[in-house]
Image (spheres, rainbow, N blue to C red):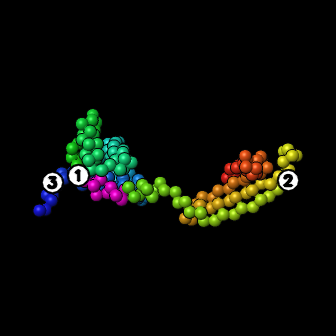
Amino acid sequence: MAVPEPPPLPEGSKPLSALLSGIAQAAYYGNAAVTDELLRGQLYPEAPPEEFRALRAKMGGLLQSIASADMDLNQLEAFLTAQTKKQGGITSDQAAVIAKFWKNHRIKIHESMINQSRWDNVLRNMNWRVDLKAQSRRIDQINTPVAIVEMELGKNGQARLRREMEGGVGENEDGHRTWTSIPTPL
């Protein structure tokens, strides 16, 4: 037995669906070419700028809330129902468009959010050496060892870290020499 098709969305739903797609393109897929001016000009050319900005902000906020919670369809239904009952909320037609959009784009948006928040913990290169201090404010620190470690992290070496560690600070309970880490930006 075939699953019944949902009722068709109202005629005004196409611009809203396209607006949600544009918001997703800009916010989650990194498409900088999709600007608010482009969306307004293509989807709501007759709307006053402040009215479009309010609609864009409302839909962007709703989509951000839905995406950050990675709502399943039951959570989404409850959330959208609450939004329709809220003063200044959304209409039931808008809720239907948002629900359909989220059903079709949930996985891609979630994957995009994961990729944007993931730190590529790939060690590309590492250099280290131990130097002796030749100059210091205090004479007792001259000729003390300093370990310098430089690391490049990420797929293309996006992050470079440099650490200088001074030795001879003390010994731990096992009699091993301890080092103090001093962060040094490159």
Q: Nearer the viewer, mark 1 or mark 2?
A: 2
Q: Is residue 109 left or right of residue 178?
A: left
Distance between the Cα atoms at labels 1 and 3? 13 Å
Res 48 visible: no
Of callouts 1 and 2, the N-terminal one: 1
Residue at coordinates 88% horizontally, 46% vertically from top-left? 139
Question: Where is mark 3, residue-wise?
Answer: 7
Q: Which mark is residue 90?
A: none
Q: Main secondary structure of the magenta part?
A: helix
Tell me the kind of residue under disc 2. Asn
* First to last magenta residue range: 100-109
* Residue that lies at the very extreme toward the left in this rendered image: 1
Q: Residue furthest top?
A: 87
- As for residue 120 lying within the magenta part, the answer is no
Q: Residue at x 27, y 50 (%)?
A: 73
Q: Is residue 43 left or right of residue 110?
A: left
